[in-house]
Amino acid sequence: MLKKDFWTSSASKLKETKYLAVMAVFIALKVMVTMIRIPVSENLNIAVSFMFAAIEGAIIGPAAGLVSGAVTDIVGYIVFPSGAFFPGYTLSSMAGMFVYGLFLYRQKITVLKIIAAKAVVNYCVNVLLGSLWSAMMFSKGYLFYAANSLIKNSLMLPIEVIILIAEFNFILPLLKRRKLIETDTPVPVPFR
């Protein structure tokens, strides 16, 4: 299991100006890209915010990620309100950041960890929780939303994993130079 130092290190990011600034930039990016989405069905979209969430999770970890996820959802609702505010979506945003931090923070970032993190986010957060929130907010039952979400998230998983692998290949050297990644994290898979 992960040691106490893992959790305290992530939580300490909430006290450091450098990391608070990084979180603010990522929160702003995630809020802005919420406008870039392709609607699939009622309350189901293809989005790109996962690209920023995964990188931020690798930088700040799961404890600080919970805060970032909450702030992102609340600020996103304030800036781009659509319908009534529902705290379930805030929990989903927090859970997604927690998962990325858990799998990618202070660890060797591998293709398997990227796949595992994205699969947990897609199936546990997006399908299970997202369908529950949709069923509570809208007119159709849980299974309707779960079936649609399962299909969409299953089809998108390999595409999103490839995007994340390419993104980490590009961004990890920059993060290491800026000392934003704490470990000697190798690049997952070179595309050379």
Image (cartoon, rainbow, N blue to C red):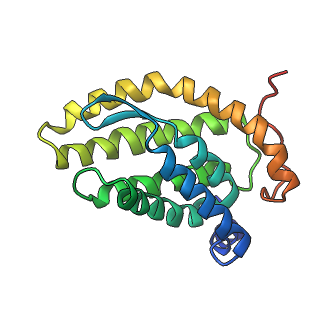
Count of numbered labels shown in the rendering? 0
Image coordinates of residue 137 in percent, x first then y, are 18, 49
**Residue 3 seen in the current view:** no
Question: With 45 as the anchor, is 141 left or right in this view?
Answer: left
Residue closer to the observer: 115 or 139:
139
Give the farthest residue toward the bottom. Answer: 15
**Residue 53 seen in the current view:** yes
Image coordinates of residue 147 in percent, x first then y, are 27, 28
**Residue 149 occupies quadrant:** top left
Image coordinates of residue 80 in percent, x first then y, are 37, 53
Residue closer to the observer: 154 or 116:
154
Question: With 86 as the anchor, is 98 left or right in this view?
Answer: right
Q: Identify the residue shown where x is 35% and y is 38%.
A: 127
Residue closer to the observer: 84 or 32:
32
In the displayed structure, 119 sits above or below 80; it is above
In the displayed structure, 13 sits above or below 156; it is below
On-image quarter of the N terminus: bottom right
Q: Identify the residue shown where x is 45% and y is 45%.
A: 34
In the displayed structure, 44 sits above or below 86; it is above
Image coordinates of residue 150 in percent, x first then y, are 35, 29
Q: Identify the residue shown where x is 20% and y is 31%.
A: 144
Give the farthest residue toward the front. Answer: 79
Give the farthest residue toward the left. Answer: 139
**Residue 78 occupies quadrant:** bottom left
Q: Identify the residue shown where x is 44% and y is 54%.
A: 93
On-image quarter of the C terminus: top right
